[in-house]
């Protein structure tokens, strides 16, 4: 007699696999666009003579847009279908990127940076899209694979310096730093066309829920705690992706291309280990994996509280990235397990809070530097990680005592 496959072992349908693949590739490209000012902002700073405050604001503005709109975008994806909203977001972002390719002047750059920031909402939309096709018991690995699209930041760090020098200014196509958003904009349009052609249509989303019904999960303290953990694992990842190239250039005096490469060594584990974090969460439980991720981050951050030579600094930031990559996946596995059928709204809020962390932390680094010194970014994150660890463990113990487990219904 054949035993039916259980939800945890049943293979994903072909449509589900196509959705995960398309969402992951699209998010990878969108994330590359989202953080491109970390690289193109450096020649812009030189060209326009920007202050540190102006440079920090320019690099952080896209993160603000992509964070604040994650919650409504997630709700729209739940209500109207993930594919539809993902395609709309991709095309609009492409339009802003292409406009940026011909932009001059700081005010214009800030305005267009707000539009480019729409790339950041692709995370909330993609999570909701995948959740509509993948069963909850398989979502740890699926969402972790999708989240590995954070590696798109390494595309920017590795390729953008080359693209800046590849095409000189004055040709028929935009040259210098302008060439980067030009290429990204075209790539987004191609991505949208392929996604529209190769992925299944959205499943019916018939629902009688009111807006109040959609937003009701946001009244739970647990959801906001998930957001705090995601600030540590994702918000700090975005902040460091923006902060480290400038730190390498200014603190160690390395060329921009080398700074991008060294930053990519932090980005790779922080992104590519996310599927592993999802798999481990499915296998051993996301609570255990999250504690391990916090521990790894604290171990890497502690030596960074003092100034170090470039090689140990690079190795320690890589360790921090490992903790971030695993923790991002385990956090979203917790979100999926505790909020089945609500990934758009709950995942959107958690992503919003994490993204806001990516916007606020670089500004906090700049504001606190006169007080805390050159290691401000690492002192700040160490304190935030330690606080989050205490809160997480305390609530984990409380839930264990109460015998509470997530509802997989």
Image (spheres, rainbow, N blue to C red):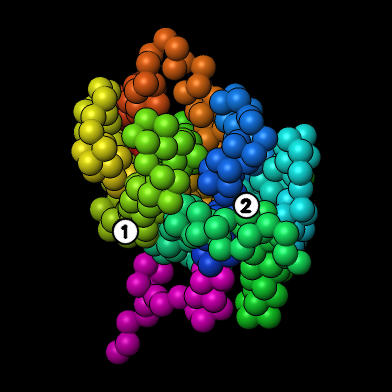
User: Given contact means CB atoms under 8 Å apart, are the residues at marks 1 and 2 in contact?
Assistant: no
Single out the residue that lies furthest toward the top.
371
Q: Is residue 176 magenta?
A: no
Residue 391 at what x, y percent from top left? Answer: 36, 25
Question: Up-down: is 46 above or below 387?
Answer: below
Q: Nearer the viewer, residue 161 or 276?
A: 161
Which residue is pictured at 70% across the width and 43% down the height? 113
State the image quarter where residue 288 is shown: top left
Question: Up-down: is 334 above or below 30?
Answer: above
Residue 340 at what x, y percent from top left? Answer: 52, 52
Residue 163 can be seen, yes or no = yes
The answer to whether 288 appears left or right of 236 in the picture is: left
Residue at mark 1 to residue at mark 2: CA–CA distance? 35 Å
Total marks shown come to 2
Residue 335 at what x, y percent from top left? Answer: 47, 46
Q: Nearer the viewer, residue 35 or 43?
A: 43
Residue 234's mark?
Answer: none
Residue 276's mark?
Answer: 1
Q: Nearer the viewer, mark 1 or mark 2?
A: 2
Q: Nearer the viewer, residue 106 or 379?
A: 106
Which residue is pictured at 49% across the width and 39% down the height? 242
Residue at label 2?
Answer: 177
Nearer-N-terminus badge (1/2): 2
Q: Is residue 8 magenta?
A: yes
State the image quarter where residue 229 is shown: top left
Determine the secondary structure under disc 1: helix
Which residue is pictured at 73% across the width and 41% down the height? 109
- Which residues are drawn in magenta? 1-23
Residue 120 at what x, y percent from top left? Answer: 61, 48
């Amino acid at each position: 007699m054949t035993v039916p496959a259980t939800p945890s072992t049943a293979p994903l349908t072909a449509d589900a696999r196509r959705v995960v693949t398309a969402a992951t590739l699209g998010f990878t490209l969108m994330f590359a666009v989202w953080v491109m000012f970390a690289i193109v902002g450096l020649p812009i700073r030189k060209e326009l003579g920007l202050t540190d405050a102006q440079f920090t604001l320019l690099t952080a503005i896209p993160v603000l847009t992509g964070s604040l709109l994650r919650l409504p975008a997630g709700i729209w994806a739940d209500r109207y279908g993930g594919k539809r909203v993902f395609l709309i977001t991709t095309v609009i972002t492409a339009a802003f990127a292409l406009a940026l390719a011909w932009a001059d002047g700081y005010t214009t750059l800030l305005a267009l940076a707000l539009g480019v920031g729409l790339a950041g909402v692709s995370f909330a939309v993609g999570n909701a899209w995948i959740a509509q096709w993948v069963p909850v018991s398989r979502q740890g690995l699926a969402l972790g694979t999708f989240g590995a699209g954070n590696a798109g930041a390494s595309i920017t760090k590795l390729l953008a310096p080359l693209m800046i020098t590849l095409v000189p200014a004055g040709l028929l196509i935009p040259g210098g730093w302008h060439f980067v958003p030009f290429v990204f904009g075209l790539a987004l349009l191609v991505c949208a066309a392929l996604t529209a052609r190769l992925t299944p249509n959205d499943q019916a989303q018939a629902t009688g829920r009111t807006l109040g019904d959609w937003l009701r999960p946001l009244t739970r303290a647990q959801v906001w705690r998930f957001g705090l953990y995601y600030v540590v694992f994702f918000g700090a990842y975005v902040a460091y992706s923006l902060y480290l190239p400038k730190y390498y250039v200014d603190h160690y005096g390395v060329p921009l291309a080398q700074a991008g490469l060294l930053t990519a060594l932090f980005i790779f584990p922080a992104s590519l280990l996310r599927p592993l974090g999802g798999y481990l969460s499915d296998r051993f439980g996301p609570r255990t994996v999250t504690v391990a991720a916090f521990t790894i981050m604290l171990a890497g951050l502690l030596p960074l509280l003092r100034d170090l030579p470039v090689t140990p600094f690079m190795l320690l930031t890589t360790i921090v990235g490992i903790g971030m990559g695993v923790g991002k996946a385990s956090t979203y596995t917790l979100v999926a397990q505790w909020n089945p059928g609500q990934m758009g709204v709950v995942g959107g809020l958690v992503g919003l809070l994490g993204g806001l962390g990516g916007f606020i932390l670089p500004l906090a680094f700049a504001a606190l530097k006169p007080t805390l010194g050159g290691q401000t970014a690492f002192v700040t994150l160490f304190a935030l990680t330690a606080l989050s660890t205490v809160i997480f463990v305390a609530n984990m113990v409380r839930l264990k005592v109460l015998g509470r487990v997530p509802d997989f219904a």
